[in-house]
Image (tube, rainbow, N blue to C red):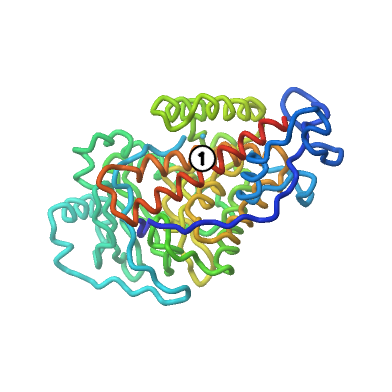
Amino acid sequence: MYSSATSPTPTTTRTALRPPTAAVGRPGPKQVPPPSRPVAPRGAADGRPVDPRGQAARTALGLRSPEAAPAGNRLPGARIPAVRPGDGRLLRPPTRPGQPVTQERIDPSALQTPAVRAALAGVSRICPAFTPRQVLREGSRHILVAGTIGRAPVVAKCLAPQAVRSEYFEQLVADFHHEVAVYRAFVRHRPPVRLPRLVAADHDRCVLVMERVPGRPAARERHPVNAPTPGEVRALLTAVRTLNLWRPPTDVFQPRLDYQLEIARYHSVGQLTDRDAGDLRGLLHGLGHGPLQLCHGDALLSNMLLAPSGPVLVDWEQAGWYLPGYDLAVLWSVLSGDTAARRQISQLAQSGGTLARDAFLVNLVLVLMREIRLYDVPGAGEEQRIMIRRLYDDAALARRAVRAAVGTR
């Protein structure tokens, strides 16, 4: 929430593993159980030839057959946020891992711009004691102002005046209202992860005041050049996994993604071929009656703070019920420069069995389609074009992995 923006590096592959065979039978109409017999090479069991491309895609994504994965509990268990042009700043000079982040210089004049003054007027209506100190962000969608209430450090988040003239105004307002509702729900049902405490909110004027948590973003870019350290990645994945396994009352949150609609949308603009769309719908058919999972919905590294007490998740505009593995798919898509982290994510995604693996692959393809649509725009610079090529390579791997998964059902 405190910052966002871009950039990856290519991935490496691991030793190829055999793809799983089709399930022996279904115990009921709702779930497809994982295979219970050893994997046999395709062609030896059903007479069809082995698809080396599907096997290579599975290997590149770090996916293993369910038999090779360690036993574990099944994951419990729906909308991609509206794609907005310019939804992140591009490539900044990277910092070295472990290098302290330079503190933003306080500029009192930034508090006097018309947009910030309008935002502060909304904040003062619900928090008269709020004293602004620093503008953390003044963008086309949101304005973030750090300040204090008494001695307590807080952050005020407001909808920017420019958003009123945006074609996405209704979507931005709906997302802001949803975030306010999520913070209020967390007051009643405290999640098992760290997040800023709600101080005050004005639903009608789109103003949110929350605790300012000490810490630094895990990354300042949407696609970071340098990934966090291995220890930081493990802590972030643990926090995300803890949230995903939490089971609040089902009526507290709502599904945030219409998967069939998203597949149709990307198919209509040519990002998905007829076969891609058919494969994704085939996997969805087997997941239609499975449990959903509570996800952050926008689990970017820039939305995670590394605080002394552990990771803190911010920016809850997209929180809700998704197919299992949505947050992991988002992290996989932005960690292209960290092969080890991607391997950990893939292992977590398939630890729940075949259904969890298939859900992760559906999420991954849709997330990568969103990232491509977001950044593959006219006028992209050379660094952005490099990132776009990597996204297309990742999308091709994900498609082949989906094709291989469909062949095992």
Residue nearest the viewer, comparing 67 with 166: 67
Numbered label tally: 1
Q: What residue is drawn where x is 80% and y is 45%?
A: 67
Q: Is residue 196 visible?
A: no
Q: Is residue 355 visible?
A: yes
- Give the side of residue 36 with respect to residue 93, left or right: right
- Give the side of residue 48 with respect to residue 235, left or right: right
Residue 266 screen position, x and y as percent: 43, 30
What residue did someone put label 1 on?
320
Q: Tell me the quadrant of the picture where the N terminus can be found.
A: bottom left
Q: Tell me the quadrant of the picture where the C terminus can be found.
A: top right
Residue 260 screen position, x and y as percent: 51, 26
Examine the rendered structure and indicate whether residue 166 appears above or below residue 70: above
What amino acid type should be assigned to the residue bearing mark 1?
A: Gly
Helix, strand, or loop for circle 1? strand
- Give the side of residue 182 with respect to residue 174, left or right: right
Q: What residue is drawn where x is 69% and y is 31%?
A: 407
Q: What residue is drawn where x is 70% and y is 50%?
A: 16
- Give the side of residue 208 with respect to residue 316, left or right: left
Q: Quadrant of residue 370?
A: top left
Pick out the residue farthest to the right.
Answer: 37
Pick out the residue farthest to the bottom.
Answer: 99
Q: What residue is drawn where x is 50% and y is 48%?
A: 330
Residue nearest the viewer, comparing 140 with 267: 267
Pick out the residue farthest to the front.
Answer: 49
Q: Quadrant of residue 18?
A: top right
Examine the rendered structure and indicate whether residue 174 appears above or below residue 337: above
Residue 355 screen position, x and y as percent: 69, 36
Residue 20 screen position, x and y as percent: 76, 39
